[in-house]
Structures are given as structure tokens and as C-alpha cells.
Image: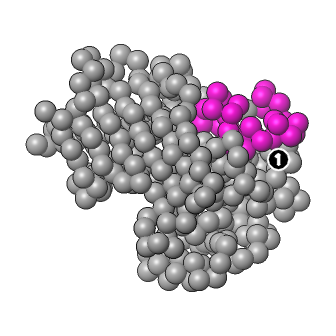
Amino acid sequence: MTKIVHLEEIKSILEKIDPIKLIEEGFIAYSQGNVTVPPVGEMVFDDPPGECHIKYGFIKKDDFFVIKVATGFYDNPKLGLPAFDGLMLLFSQKTGQLLSVLLDEGHLTNIRTASAGAIAAKYFAPKKIKRIGIFGAGTHGRLQPIYLQKVLDCKNIITWGTNQEELDIYKRDMKKLGFKVETSLNAEDITSTSNLIVTCTPSKTPLIEAEQINEGTHITAIGSDTPEKQELDSAILKKANRVIVDSLSQCMERGESFKAMQNRMIEKEKLVEIGKAIVNKNFQRTSEEEITVVDLTGVAVQDIQIAKAVWTYIKKNH
């Protein structure tokens, strides 16, 4: 019988597993060619602005395959609704039976994205973090600094947002979690004081220009997950010493790398998959002076890994 798992149970299970380790293993398997991931299915809506992503795939010779549906409707908070929703369907790779419906309301997607941000910082951020700069005061703008604490020691953050009211709420909430927080409506305040920057907005126009990026800066770009979105001036990727992507094939169609190639700022040859970089130190940051960009578009192997972990925990403990 198919087991339906609700958000509260999923949250309690996540406290007992290590998603960062699981996502890292998934990236390695993906870059080694051991994962089948078909092209992303998506619908993009204009009014109100929103999107629905369908990501799915399987690890070869594994027990499961996963289909994930996730939505993001960015005006929802004005209606008193969360911006994200969704679910994950976990099937048997042996029989095709639907084993579990994970009604995570988009939470597993958010956690696997936060975990990927932590992995990006683990291998590409400078050793000494002066300050973490966050673009976006929503769900990801909160989860990214929380998950970064698992791989580095810096609770000094400055966050950019689109309106002061949103930033004031953000500042209050993050201070309660022990962060030292400043906020700004001016991007320059973030880029001039931070050497680890995370962009997590649905922007369709660049928020940061190349001349604002100082030597030794690392940027993890996670907002640009459709062909329309762009958070970084494409010249930043040209300026960077290293450009790392979660999926070469996906970054041909979406993300900051796609935009930079479209704008003839970089060639495909400059891109290295993060799974390859994790296992080969030659592709990781080698000095405090390098400028590095990690372009995360969100790959189905992340969904597979986190859904499997929740299901495996349930089977072992029930």
C-alpha cells in the first residue's frame, strides 16, 4: 500500500539525517554518469508570476525512482500563503509501484537546495569569510545562511531585499537564530563587504554587475533556474577564475551559465560539474584571491537522494 507522508513527519525525519552528505554523493554519481535525468518539465506563468517544475530520474541499479513536482508563486505571501508547494513521488525501480507520496509542500526542494549551497561553499568559498552576503529575504535567503553554518563559521550576514518591510521581518527572525544581521536595498552594500555571496531571487534582470565583484569573492547563484531568470551580470562569469555548474546539460538551457554563453561571455569549456570538482581537487579553489561562481539550477538527483533518505528512515523505524 502506498504510504502518504506529511510535512511534519518529513521535518522530524530531516533532523535525523545529513542531507548535505547525501546531496554530495548524488552530485558525484551524476557526474560519473550513473544517474538518468530527463530534461526538466516546466510551466511558467505571467499573471500572477509563478512556475511549476517537474524533475525526475533514477540512479542506475538502485531500488527507486523519483518524480518531483514543485511550484513557486512569488506573490503568494501577499495572500498569506507560502511561496512554495509541491510533492515527491517515490516508486520502486523493480516493479514500478508507487511506494510513497511525500507531501512536503516544497520543503524537501528547499532543503536540498540549501544543502547544495553548503556544498558549493565547502569547496569554493575562501577559507576566511568576512561576511556572508545574501540576495533575497525569502525562504532561501533564510535557509542558505542556516545551512552554511554546517560547513563554515560565520554568522555575520548582510541581506539585500526588494522592500524594507520584508527586510525588517527578515532581520528580526534571523537575529533570533543568533545571526548578526544588516540589511540594505542597495546591492553595492552587499558586494563591497562580503566575500561569500548567495543569490536566491526570481529576478529576470541582473542584480550584481561585474565591477562590483572584488578579488577573492565566491558567488553561489541559485535563483536562476528557468531560461528567463538571471541574477548575475554575465561579465561576472567571464571575470571568474572558475565557473562550476551542477549539471552541464541543464546549464546549456537555464541558469547563469546559459545566459553568459548566450551573451558570448564564456564558452562551454569553462564549465566544470560540481560532482567532478568534489572528487578532483584540481577543480576546487586553490587560492584566497580567486573569484569563483557556482551555478545551481537544481538537479533531479538531489530530489532522488533526499526522497530516498526520508523513505529509508521510515522503513527502518516503522
User: In the picture, residue 176 is in which quadrant?
Assistant: bottom left
Q: Is residue 20 left or right of residue 47?
A: left
Q: Closer to the camera, 193 or 162?
A: 162
Note whether 258 is above or below 183 in the view shown: above
The secondary element bearing badge 1 is classed as helix
Q: Is residue 250 left or right of residue 97?
A: right
Q: Residue at x 65, y 48 (%)?
A: 224
Q: Amino acid at mark 1?
A: Ser
Q: Is residue 204 left or right of residue 239?
A: left
Q: Residue at x 46, y 57 (%)?
A: 84
Note whether 48 is above or below 184 in the view shown: above
Quadrant that contains the N terminus: top left
Quadrant that contains the C terminus: top left
Residue 88 rendering spot, x and y as whole percentages: 35, 41
Indicate whether residue 259 is drawn in magenta: yes
Indicate whether residue 55 is drawn in magenta: no
Q: Which residue is mark 1?
A: 234
Highlighted range, magenta: 241-270
Would you call the spot at circle 1 few (<14 residues within 10 Å), some (14-19), or many (20 or more)?
many
Q: Closer to the camera, 281 or 19?
A: 19
Residue 74 rendering spot, x and y as whole percentages: 55, 62
Q: Is residue 93 left or right of residue 28?
A: left
Residue 202 rendering spot, x and y as whole percentages: 63, 57
